[in-house]
């Protein structure tokens, strides 16, 4: 049956509205579908007045969030940078106060390193950390027990970017490409090559359908952000 011009226009308009509605409603689902898994990007040894602002800017520009494992001595010295990390949507973890070899220290010394860092980060406006990364990844039963005393989950890593050892920008990006769902990579905030790698990290994760997630205090694995 032949439609009148008015009916044809009306039908086309309804179809267009239906299509627009479908696209609008489907946008969040499509975004969620783009994340087939989550990985934990971590940066140790901050904060600092020189490196933290540039790293936070690069992460924000590339739509990435990360866990910043701060040393207490630097959190105390640069409280504004701790607040900047929190305001940028990063998660802040405890990386001891002076970065010693904790396995060579007494329980009292370990307690001091961890407790003072908790206090320094909280006083700077970074909240009370729930995650703890032992310096050099060195740990033992005493270190774990003291961390647990302060409600901290110990986090090491699955992939070492080797940025601390002079890894090139390309090598850092390749290290990120090895990550699978739930895994965590070790990086540091001070190497220039790490800062330069951030755009490549974002592209690599997107190509694999992975998103930068938070590290769960319950499981110690990377998961979808809850806040």
Image: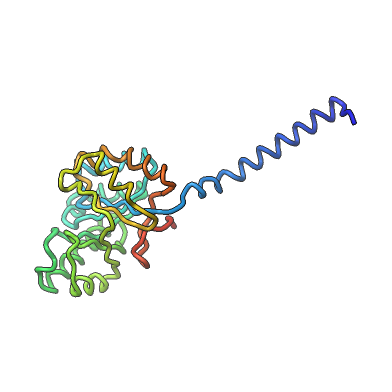
Quadrant for residue 168, please give it: top left
Residue, x 87% and y 29% (percent of image)? Answer: 3
Q: Nearer the viewer, residue 205 or 217?
A: 205
Q: Is residue 86 in sight in this rendering?
A: no
Above-or-below relation of 12 to 215: above
Above-or-below relation of 202 to 181: above
Q: Quadrant of the N terminus?
A: top right
Left or right, residue 222 beside residue 28: left
Residue, x 21% and y 59% (percent of image)? Answer: 95
The location of residue 69, given as percent across then percent down, is 25, 55
Check the image and tell me how it is coloured.
rainbow
Residue, x 29% and y 44% (percent of image)? Answer: 174
Q: How many marks?
A: 0
Q: Nearer the viewer, residue 106 or 49?
A: 106
Q: Is residue 24 in sight in this rendering?
A: yes
Quadrant for residue 149, please give it: bottom left
Above-or-below relation of 15 to 117: above
Residue, x 36% and y 42% (percent of image)? Answer: 204
Q: Quadrant of the C terminus?
A: bottom left
Q: Nearer the viewer, residue 38 or 134?
A: 38
Left or right, residue 17 beside residue 7: left
Taking the view exactly as shown, the residue that stands out farthest to the right is 1
The location of residue 84, given as percent across then percent down, is 30, 46
The location of residue 23, given as percent across then percent down, is 62, 40
The location of residue 107, given as percent across then percent down, is 14, 74
């Amino acid at each position: 049956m032949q439609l009148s011009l008015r009916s044809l226009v009306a039908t086309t308009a309804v179809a267009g509205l239906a299509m627009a509605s479908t696209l609008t409603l489907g946008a969040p689902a499509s975004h969620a579908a783009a994340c087939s898994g989550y990985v934990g990007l971590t940066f140790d040894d901050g904060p600092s007045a020189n490196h933290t602002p540039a790293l936070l800017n690069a992460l924000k520009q590339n739509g990435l969030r990360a866990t910043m494992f701060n040393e207490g001595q630097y959190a105390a010295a640069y409280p504004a940078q701790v607040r900047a990390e929190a305001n940028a949507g990063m998660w802040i973890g405890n990386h001891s106060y002076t970065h010693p070899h904790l396995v060579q220290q007494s329980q009292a010394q370990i307690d001091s390193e961890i407790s003072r860092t908790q206090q320094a980060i909280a006083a700077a406006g970074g909240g009370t950390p729930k995650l703890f990364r032992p310096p050099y990844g060195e740990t033992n039963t005493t270190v774990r027990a003291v961390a647990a005393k302060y409600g901290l989950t110990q986090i090491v890593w699955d992939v070492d970017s080797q940025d601390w050892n002079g890894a090139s920008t390309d090598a850092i990006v390749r290290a990120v490409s090895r990550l699978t769902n739930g895994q965590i990579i070790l990086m540091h905030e001070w190497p220039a090559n790490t800062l330069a790698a951030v755009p490549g990290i974002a592209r690599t994760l997107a190509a694999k359908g992975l998103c930068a997630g938070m590290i769960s205090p319950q499981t110690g694995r990377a998961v979808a952000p809850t806040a």
